[in-house]
Amino acid sequence: MTEFREMNLRPELAESLKRIGFVTATEVQEKAIPELMKGRNLVVRAKTGTGKTAAFLVPIMQRIGRTREMEAVILAPTRELAQQIAKFSRDVGGPLGISTVVVYGGASINAQMGALRHGVNILVGTPGRILDLMSRGALKTDMVRYLVLDEADVMLDMGFITDVERIIGRMPHNRQMMLFSATVPKEVVRIAEKYSEDSGRISAGPEEEPVVTTIKHEYAMVPRRLKFAGLLAYIKEHPPKKAIIFTRTKFEANAVNRVLGSQGYNTILMHGGLTQSARERSLGSFRNGAQFLIATNIASRGLDIADVTDIINFDAPDDPKVYIHRVGRSARMGKEGKAITIADTEQRVALQDIEHTAHIRMTRINLNTAPFENIDLPIRERHSSGHGRFGGRGGGRRFRGRGVRHEFS
């Protein structure tokens, strides 16, 4: 294991890293930082949670100038990931006089333009907002020496390829390019070959395992009418220290939030129906001590939240890749984690697909739902299609089983 002080970093940079607890480099940092400090163009394959942010920011900060010119642009697929990268950049670079600005949609573009006018060394942002700022003439790229594409495969999956290529085309030809990705599909390779000369490749961790090996995978079979009872039983029998509960829709997220809140649990809600400021407050509250974050897949990509012990899938996701992204929010930086999926009998095939794609084995556990089967908790949500997720047709009809009562009106 290599320590950062052994990497020939500027003493003040090594000290700034140590101040926030970064002493020993992870595998991806140990492999990538020396090559990037030589100025090489790199494609780096590493799973989320392995320390990729420091792997590209440390060499940038080592070589960045002392001016107020924008020398580095970092593209991220989501605003949450952009914020996390910017926070690390400010925590490490702030004491060194390195200025970081983060830009993304859903926030005031005028405020972001004002921040850029005050000077910036490192710009972090989502592709759409960066293009918008370029079109307004608020973003000059003449002095850019470093371009990073973080979670490159996710940006491709989200349809950002055209925006990304337009941004790359506006950068100086001689800039250094770094592509970081959990997987390296052909499209990522094509971009590297098209826009950077002599691009090297680095891999960290076994490529054949898309999920880190420190996660324990479990599932429970629960009739759909007892889904809430199953969730409450799991939390009682296996109390998580800090958990993210994933649901398919924001309507389910709202329902789970109400059920757990009524039982006295400290819960935070996050989904696309909330404003950007509300989502930021939710993440802040979860980081600062809330036990449960109840979220849709908006929280499954790019979020780096320390000490998440459990991932609870309220349903088995249909797409195994969604499962992989979800459980990647736990077991960060080599820590252990646990993933539980509360499935019903119709989801057996989905569980098998997850095991096959993620190269994992899920252990079945039994839950005692009896103490929660007669809890009567009215939940009022409006469902635009008139169909409830927990029973037949909705439209204001009340669904009663032996379990928790669900109302959609």
Image: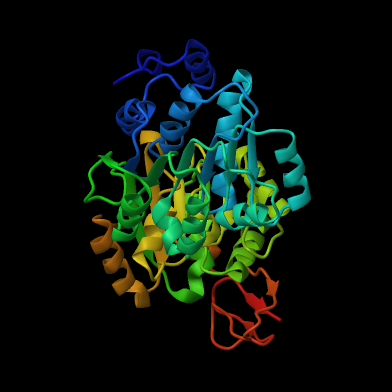
- Horizontal relation, residue 72 to residue 349: left or right: right
Please state the horizontal and vertical placement of residue 31, each as a whole percent of the image: 29, 30
**Does 322 sit left or right of 253 as displayed?**
left
Task: Pick whichever, 163 or 319, lies toward us.
Answer: 163
**Horizontal relation, residue 87 to residue 324: left or right:** right
- Number of marks: 0
Instruction: Tell me: residue 260, above or below residue 287.
Output: below
Picture quarter with the C terminus: bottom right
Quadrant of the image occupied by residue 395: bottom right
**Residue 45 seen:** no
The x, y position of residue 46, in whole percent, is 33, 43
The foreground one among 399 and 65 is 65
Give the answer, above or below, for where 282 lies relative to 357.
above
Q: In which quarter of the image is the N terminus?
A: top left
How far across and how far down the image is residue 209, in percent?
25, 50
- Farthest top residue? 11
Q: Residue at x 23, y 63 (%)?
A: 356
Residue at horizontal 52%, vertical 25%? Answer: 64
Q: Residue at 52% across / 64% down in the picture?
A: 247
Question: Residue 340 at what x, y percent from top left?
Answer: 40, 55
- Above or below residue 44? Residue 393 is below
Asked which quadrant contains residue 9, the reply is top left
Q: What colour scheme does the image use?
A: rainbow
| Res. 212 in view | yes
Instruction: Looking at the picture, tell me which residue is in the foreground, 26 or 314.
Output: 26
Q: Splitting the image into 4 quarters, where does residue 349 fall?
A: bottom left
